[in-house]
Amino acid sequence: MNHFGCDVALLSVTDTEYGAVLHFHDWEAFRVPGDDQRYERASFFRDGREHTLIHTRTGEMGMTAASTAASKIIYTFRPRYLIMVGIAAGIALTEVAEQIYGDVIVPDVVWNYAVGKFVSPDAAFITYGDVGFLPRSTSVAVPEEMLAFVREAAASPENQCRVLVGPMACGSTVVANRNILDKQVYSQFKDTMGLDMESYAVVYAALHASEPRPLPLIVKSVCDYANSEKSDQYQKFAAYTSCEFAKLLYEKYLPLD
């Protein structure tokens, strides 16, 4: 007998992501004694059985807040699956030029591109004027068993989203400069498909939790690109497609018994 306390826990960050999550279920807000975090509870049915959803949002953007919220929801509710939904920056490379707003990115590997050491430019292969950077990136892999269900759901006729599986870069700042992207991201993981500010912390927290630990997944959609032309125009649409695909996953494809 397992000791999972709920079936699925969802994490979001921004007001836009939060609004998209609320759209898909009839949520009941509640608090846990001794915890100032706000949570929402909902349920869905599969094969006549009721399954439980818990949602919370982080207090702010970034890995510190994400790891705190993820750890809280893991240890308080012991979910079987931990899924972060929301928005991310896409990559406008020639080989993925078809990547468009609303495309869902599900990373198989999440890596932290911001870890490293600033040195003199002659001591590093990544340079920014008079400053050199020696990367010491770290990465975590999403369990392959989760990706198998992602691919099955993506190929389903019920899916209305385009789903891309590949590496996602995670860092502490918003990237709106193509120079940073070329030098610091592509030089380390050339096949990176998207960037965000929380995914690494969420997957790391899940994989390093005590038993029973949840299986983690990041489901984020392209709302803009990592360049100087960043815009908020497509954030609502991207947040919606992210939540729509995540809902298809846990309601139809992820094992719950």
Image (cartoon, rainbow, N blue to C red):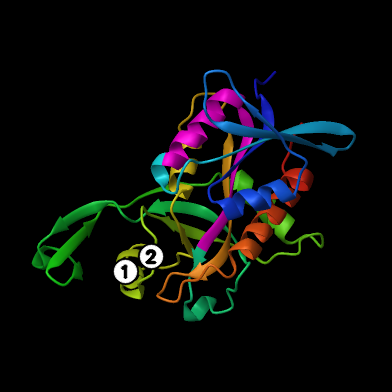
Residue, disc 1: 180
Q: Nearer the viewer, residue 24 or 192?
A: 24
Instruction: Give the crowd class for mark 2: few <14, some 14-19, many >=20 residues within 10 Å.
Output: some
Q: Residues within 10 Å of mark 1 (few under 14, many from 20)?
A: some
Where residue 238 sits, quadrant-wise, is: bottom right
Asked if the stretch drawn in magenta spans residue 113, the answer is no
Residue appearing at x 88%, y 37% in the figure: 47
Horizontal placement of 217 versus 174: left or right? Answer: right
Query: Which stretch appears magenta?
Result: 65-88
Which residue matches tag 2?
Answer: 175
2 vs 1, front mark: 2
Q: Amino acid at mark 1?
A: Ile
User: Looking at the image, do the residues carrying marks 2 and 1 touch, with CB atoms under 8 Å apart?
Assistant: yes
Residue 94 in the image, given as x and y percentages of width and height:
48, 81
The residue positioned 51% from the left and 29% from the top of the image is 72
- Label 2 sits on what residue type? Val
State left or right for residue 245 relative to residue 33: right
**x, y percentage for residue 248?**
75, 51
Regarding mark 2 in the picture, which secondary structure is present there? loop
Task: Measure how far apart labels 2 and 1 are at the Cα level.
Answer: 7 Å
Task: Name the one closer to the observer, 11 or 233.
Answer: 233
- Residue at 40% across, 75% down: 228
Residue 154 seen in the current view: yes
- Is 76 covered by the magenta stretch? yes
If the image is split into quadrants, where does the N terminus sit? top right
**Relative depth, front residue between 192 and 39:** 39
Q: Is residue 161 left or right of residue 133?
A: right
**Total marks drawn?**
2
Using the image as rendered, state which of residue 99 and residue 191 is in the foreground: 99
